[in-house]
Image: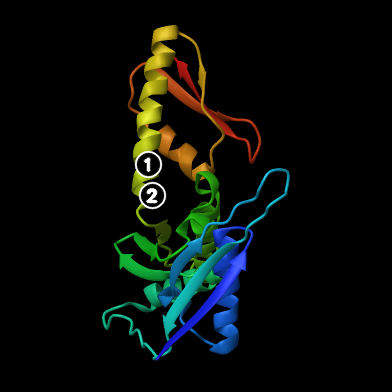
Amino acid sequence: MELQVEAAGETVGEAKWAALRELEKQHPGVDKAAVHFQVVTEGERGLLGVGFTPARVIARVSTEPVVEESPSDETDLVSEVRALVTRIVEGIGVTARIELDEEDELITASCSGPDLGMLIGRHGQTIDAVQYLANAVMWRRHPEDRKEVVVDAAGYRDRRRATLESLAVRSAERALSDREPVELEPMTAVERKVVHVHLKEFDGVETTSEGTEPNRYVVVRPV
């Protein structure tokens, strides 16, 4: 059986959340990650607030129960990370499926689903906060058996790392060419670390972090 609702909002995102809330009222416990959206109209704000047209979407979801079983070889630690990240992500209002990959010193939680832009946030601020919280909780629970937790969404980490590494090299080359320090845009601690590590072996420059959060930034200086 398929459940369908139509909802409106000032933006497409607000219309989607209105539709999700209505689906939950009609069918409590509905699998949010399984909801499919059809955008009827993206809406228009109009000039100076005149002629406003709301955005409208149609949300559809199967009400047949879907049971997802964890892999039989999933460790207790990975299962705990899965439950924790799921709880955090749902707590900020994002629906996502989460796949876990465990290595010797690392557990990666990869999220997929609609509205991942909301999970990632501006310059990755939201997903970095989710990752920080997940690590803080797991390290407190398992001080003797700690593994770093990486939270990713739609391959964001790899794309952002590549962008930052390219920016780091260009900034280093500019610092050497102009013989002057180059200040980068404010970044999160995770992103600043990517720049510092990438330029660690770059001859002729050194990097420092300056400023105060949330506007702390990297400075690339010629040695």
* Residue type of the residue flagged with mark 2: Arg
SS state under label 2? helix
SS state under label 1? helix
State the separation of the CA atoms marked 1 and 2.
6 Å
Q: Residue at x 54, y 30 (%)?
A: 185
Quadrant position of residue 211: top right
Q: Residue at x 53, y 57 (%)?
A: 42
The numbered dot on residue 161 is 1
Compare residues 47 and 206 and report the one nearer the observer. Answer: 47
- Residue 92 visible at all: no
Q: Residue at x 63, y 57 (%)?
A: 53
Q: Is residue 200 left or right of residue 208?
A: left
**The N terminus: image quadrant:** bottom left
Give the residue at mark 2: 157
**The C terminus: image quadrant:** top left
- Measured as percent of width and height from the top left, residue 62 is found at 40, 85
- Measured as percent of width and height from the top left, residue 221 is found at 47, 18
Instruction: Check the image and report above or below for 95 versus 208.
Output: below
* Residue type of the residue flagged with mark 1: Arg
Specify the farthest residue to the front. 51
Specify the farthest residue to the left. 73
Q: Is residue 183 left or right of residue 76?
A: right
- Measured as percent of width and height from the top left, residue 204 is found at 37, 16
Compare residues 102 and 215 and report the one nearer the observer. Answer: 215
Quadrant position of residue 25: bottom right
Q: Is residue 93 left or right of residue 95?
A: right
Q: Are marks 1 and 2 in contact (CB under 8 Å)?
A: yes
Quadrant position of residue 78: bottom left
